[in-house]
């Protein structure tokens, strides 16, 4: 398969979508991002790398961080993790509170904000230094020790994160989280502020393609848990657009409002794509289009 040519063809074909949507601006520090950027990197399990455009430019991974947090949580707690968070698609926006009150403080899944805040609380309870532990895990997965939090983005989100603060308060009221609200929120925002490139994300997600057990920075996931992590990405990775992403692309994946998307073809490759302009669901317009074309041109998807 000539993945390099396929990526180059994809880029030409998605150019008509280049000015659709806009970058996330509800986080003021992200509003400053140049919206007209694009990168893509595909890494195969056999070690080849194919990339185009700004695949080496770092950006805010935002909700993609929730996959790393869930992997750590599963490694630390196993099936007990699911006592405080569900694994059903929500069909609602990533920051919605509607179900959370009706379902008495039990978030639908770990990829909506409420669920990720629960995982942040779990990591704070389980680890002596959760912030260092989280970074250490990502650095080990990506094979790069310079990956870091962006404090300007984290603080900017904290200063404007009224909805996430409301979610954390509701979770605390129902007893789903146990740590101090401010501490949990700041850790959650820091996780989202991590900056990585498409190349680094594709590298990190290779660990989730293999279906053989792995251990990075002391966190171990069995092949069975990796399978389950992929299942949650498939059903919940794109919030109220999870069905559409499944329909168009046919791979498990996860998006973030920084404009990044990572997807996995089990036993074949991981692929990361980035373009800051988002659709109304908070997912990258060019990113979804590029991945749709990837599975169309290669005729490879999980279905
Ligand atoms: N930090 C963002 C938030 O909580 C993450 C959302 C996202 O990437 N979908 O709103």
Image (cartoon, grey):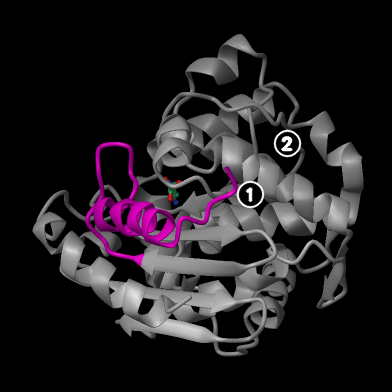
The residue pinned by badge 1 equals: 184
Closer to the camera, 128 or 70?
70
Q: Who comes first in sequence, dot 2 or dot 1?
A: 2
Residue 48: image x %, image y %?
56, 86
Q: Marks 2/1: CA distance? A: 9 Å
Residue 34's image quarter? bottom left
Return the residue at label 2: 177
Q: Nearer the viewer, residue 163 or 240?
A: 240
Residue 134 location (% of width, % of height): 69, 68
Tell me, yes or no, if residue 200 can be seen here. yes
State yes or no: discs 2 and 1 in contact (Cβ < 8 Å). yes
- Is-magenta flag for residue 30? no
Q: Would residue 280 be counted in the magenta stretch?
A: yes
Looking at the image, is 106 positioned above or below residue 264? above
Can I make out residue 180 in this image?
no
- Of residue 145 and residue 43, the one placed in the foreground of this image is 43
Left or right, 172 with reference to 284: right
| Quadrant of image for the C terminus | top right
Q: Start and end of the magenta stretch?
A: 274-303
x then y, percent, for residue 176: 74, 30
Counting other residues with Cα less than 10 Å from the Cα at mark 2, is it few (<14), some (14-19), or many (20 or more)? many
Helix, strand or loop status at disc 2: loop
Q: Is residue 61 left or right of residue 173?
A: left
Residue 50 in which image quadrant: bottom left
- Residue 124 position, x and y percent, is 76, 55
Query: Is 235 drawn above or below residue 59 in the view shown?
Result: above
Image height of 45 relative to 279, above or below: below
Q: Residues within 10 Å of mark 1 (few under 14, many from 20)?
A: many
Location of residue 137 (image quadrant)? bottom right
Q: Which mark is residue 126?
A: none
Q: Residue at x 79, y 61 (%)?
A: 211
The residue at the point 76 percent across, 45 percent down is 228
């Amino acid at each position: 398969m000539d993945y390099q040519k396929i990526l180059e063809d994809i880029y030409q074909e998605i150019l008509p979508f280049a000015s659709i949507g806009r970058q996330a601006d509800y986080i003021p520090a992200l509003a400053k991002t140049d919206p007209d950027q694009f990168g893509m990197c595909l890494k195969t399990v056999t070690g080849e790398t194919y990339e185009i455009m700004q695949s080496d430019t770092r950006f805010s991974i935002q909700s993609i961080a929730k996959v790393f947090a869930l992997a750590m949580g599963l490694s630390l707690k196993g099936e007990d993790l699911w006592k405080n968070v569900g694994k059903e698609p929500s069909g609602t926006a990533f920051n919605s509170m509607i179900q959370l009150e009706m379902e008495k403080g039990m978030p639908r899944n770990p990829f909506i904000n409420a669920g990720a805040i629960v995982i942040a609380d779990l990591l704070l309870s389980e680890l002596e230094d959760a912030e260092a532990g989280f970074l250490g895990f990502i650095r080990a997965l990506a094979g790069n020790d310079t990956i870091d939090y962006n404090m300007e983005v984290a603080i900017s989100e904290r200063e404007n994160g009224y909805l996430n603060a409301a979610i954390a308060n509701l979770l605390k009221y129902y007893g789903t989280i146990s740590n101090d609200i401010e501490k949990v929120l700041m850790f959650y925002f820091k996780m989202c502020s991590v900056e990585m490139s498409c190349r680094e994300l594709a590298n990190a997600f290779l660990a989730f393609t293999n279906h053989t057990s792995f251990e990075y920075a002391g966190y171990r996931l069995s092949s069975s848990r990796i399978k389950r992590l992929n299942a949650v990405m498939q059903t919940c990775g794109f919030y109220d657009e999870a069905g559409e992403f499944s329909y168009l692309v046919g791979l498990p994946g996860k998006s973030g409002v920084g404009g990044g998307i990572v997807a996995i073809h089990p036993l074949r490759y991981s692929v990361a794509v980035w373009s800051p302009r988002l659709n109304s669901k908070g997912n990258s317009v060019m990113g979804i289009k590029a991945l749709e074309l990837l599975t169309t041109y290669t005729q490879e998807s999980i279905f």
